[in-house]
Image (tube, rainbow, N blue to C red):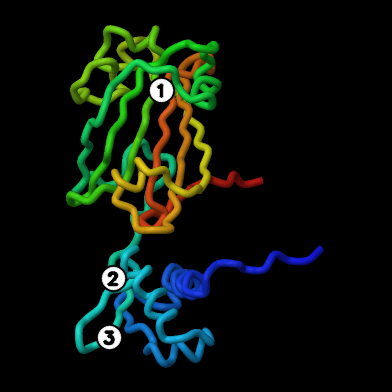
Amino acid sequence: MPRRADSRPLHQQVAAALRAQIMSGDLAPGARLPSTSQLVETFGAANPTIQKAQAQLKDEGYLRSQPGKGVYVREREPFVVEAGNYFAPSPRGYAYQLLDVAEVVPPADVATALGLTEGERAVLRQRLMTRDGEPVELSYSYYPAHLAAGTPLAGRGKIRGGAPQVLAELGCPQREFADRLSARQPTTEEVELLDLPAEVPVIRQFRTIRTYGDRPVEVTVMVKGGHLYELLYRVEVSEG
């Protein structure tokens, strides 16, 4: 079976190769990037192509320029988030902005995960998470309307103690959750709210939360810029 050829523009191929070297540590944080002439020779590309690739990586935060000195690899490490955590592991510098609360007919995958019938409604809480003032994640939390109605989940203010506390008070404590992860190109809303550079994909984390009796009580869809995050999984391996 013939292999698919890389049909991307050459500057995207160069940017992808450099991005992979930065993420692997082969181009270490704070290291000076090879000169443009060296990159021209390495990739067999014209000078403008190399410049365009560098511009893309600068926009994504992987590279930075020092006038008169050269181009350097970012010193900032990506945000490493344990996928099992409901929030980022360190709250320092993080804040949530509540964007909207509404009763809606949820998307089909959310309705299926919540066990809702066709046309049945859910309460949606849409939030934007920032870190040091910069947008890093959009989250869309859905709760069955018959469960959330008349509770702080349906209110337009921030919830003291968070949604887990409200669910516990309703007799539906969180007992288990499952995540599905995927990557895709962002929607216009996501580009604008997350201030995403061009051509950056997003990580979509689809979380279903269940209470006693395997009953689903919440679905949260988290959307993160793919250039900012790494997700960490820990699994204990039993002996024997």
Work out whether mark 1 precedes mark 3 in sequence or the reverse, and give the earlier one: 3
Q: Mark 1, residues whose alpha carbon is within 10 Å: few (<14), some, or many (≥20)? A: some
Instruction: Name the residue type under label 1.
Output: Gln
Between the residue at mark 1 and the residue at mark 3, the CA separation in whole angstroms equals 51 Å
- Residue type of the residue flagged with mark 2: Glu
Q: Element type at marker 2?
A: loop
Quadrant of the rendered image containing residue 98: top left
Residue pictured at 43% horizontal, 49% vertical: 202
Residue 209 quadrant = top left
What crowding class fits label 3: few (fewer than 14 Cα within 10 Å), some (14-19), or many (20 or more)?
Answer: few
Residue 91 on image: x %, y %: 23, 44
100 in relation to 187, above or below? above
**Quadrant the N terminus occupies:** bottom right
Amino acid type indicated by mark 3 = Gly
Q: Earlier in the sequence, mark 2 or mark 3?
A: 3
Pointer 2: what residue? 75
**Residue located beneath label 3 in the image:** 70
Nearest the eye: 105 or 33: 105
Mark 2–mark 3 distance (CA, rounded to whole Å): 15 Å
Measured from the top left, where is residue 203 in percent x and y? Answer: 45, 47
Q: Position of residue 116 (x, y in %)?
A: 51, 14
Residue at position x 46%, y 86% in the image: 46
Identify the residue position indicated by label 1 in the image: 174
